[in-house]
Image (spheres, rainbow, N blue to C red):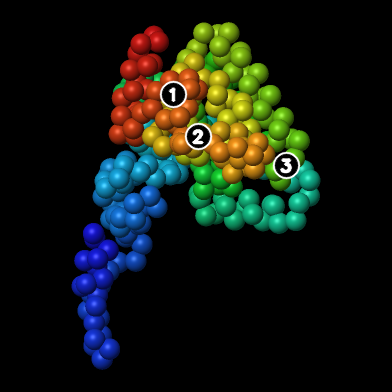
Amino acid sequence: MIIDKLKKRNKINDNQESKVDIPVGKWVKCEKCGEILYKEDLHNNFSVCSNCGNHFRLSARRRIKQIIDENTFKAFDLNIETVNPLNIDGYTEKIEGLKAKTGIDEAVVCGTGKIYDEEVIICAMDGNFLMGSMGSVVGEKITYSIEKSIELKLPIIIFSVSGGARMQEGIISLMQMAKTSSSIAKLHEAGLLYISVFTDPTYGGVTASFASLGDIILAEPKAMIGFAGPRVIKQTIGEELPEGFQTSEFQLEHGFVDKIVERKDMKETIYKLIKFHK
């Protein structure tokens, strides 16, 4: 393994200084198989481990870069800010810190773009922003995107990754479930295509609302999909859960997902579905 080679090269005597210069931040460890991967090679491989096929979690920006044609993405500028309706200590500071760290203003990035010259609307959730939790702004952004899809008569693709409704916003976050779902009902009435893509992990109120309402539901390999987590379910029902419970493979077998698509094939698959629908 690469890590063994690095250790061997970096092994020195007590009285000898190391002359091996290993750049900091250039390597990443696969959490599934433990392989040490060069970041640039990982990114060139769609952020998929070349050793075991593990799909690393993606930021919204990298997701859009992989799916949307270069220089065609235009983000919606809604000029709305996340507030602190329950006056929870530290929530506002947490949001501001995440904005600075991630470079985005909320847990979803939405806009228009093209997939092999086919114009679409895309929403990509970002697990780096409070685990992609859905608060009032996330719900508004997704609802606005769906309404723009109806207005412009364009297909919409939503990539979901989420821990569920955002507890810091209480009932307001739960209201986003009904809000997004009702807008998707209007989308269906308009006869427009909605492709929902589950990525790892997608849970809670997002799974229980817009993520499960796609005309076609895709999922990445080994993605965890559910409402409550397996540990909570096991404790609640007092039963052993089936092997692979809540993985995308399990959901495919039980009819919850239409197709599992590897990341390298995702753009081509979505493009074919759009062309077929037209």
Q: Residue under label 3, please give it.
A: 169
C-alpha separation, residue under disc 2 versus residue under disc 1: 12 Å
Q: Residue under label 2, please give it.
A: 242
Give the position of the N terminus as an image quadrant: bottom left
Q: Which residue is at the front of the view, 8 or 144? A: 8
> Please, what secondary structure does the residue beneath circle 2 have?
loop
Q: What residue type is disc 2 on?
A: Pro
Neighbourhood count class around disc 2 (C-alpha, 10 Å): few under 14, some 14–19, many 20 upward: few
> Please, what secondary structure does the residue beneath circle 3 have?
helix
* Quarter holding residue 29: bottom left
Q: What residue type is disc 3 on?
A: Glu
Q: Position of residue 76 (x, y in %)?
A: 53, 32
Residue 131 visible in this rendered orientation of the protein: yes
Tag 3–tag 1 contact (CB < 8 Å):
no
Q: Is residue 18 above or below residue 110?
A: below
Q: What residue type is disc 1 on?
A: Glu
> Please, what secondary structure does the residue beneath circle 1 have?
helix
**Residue at the (63%, 50%) spot, across then down:** 95
C-alpha separation, residue under disc 3 versus residue under disc 2: 34 Å
**Residue at the (56%, 38%) spot, across then down:** 240
Please indicate whether residue 276 sits to the left or right of residue 180 in the image.
left
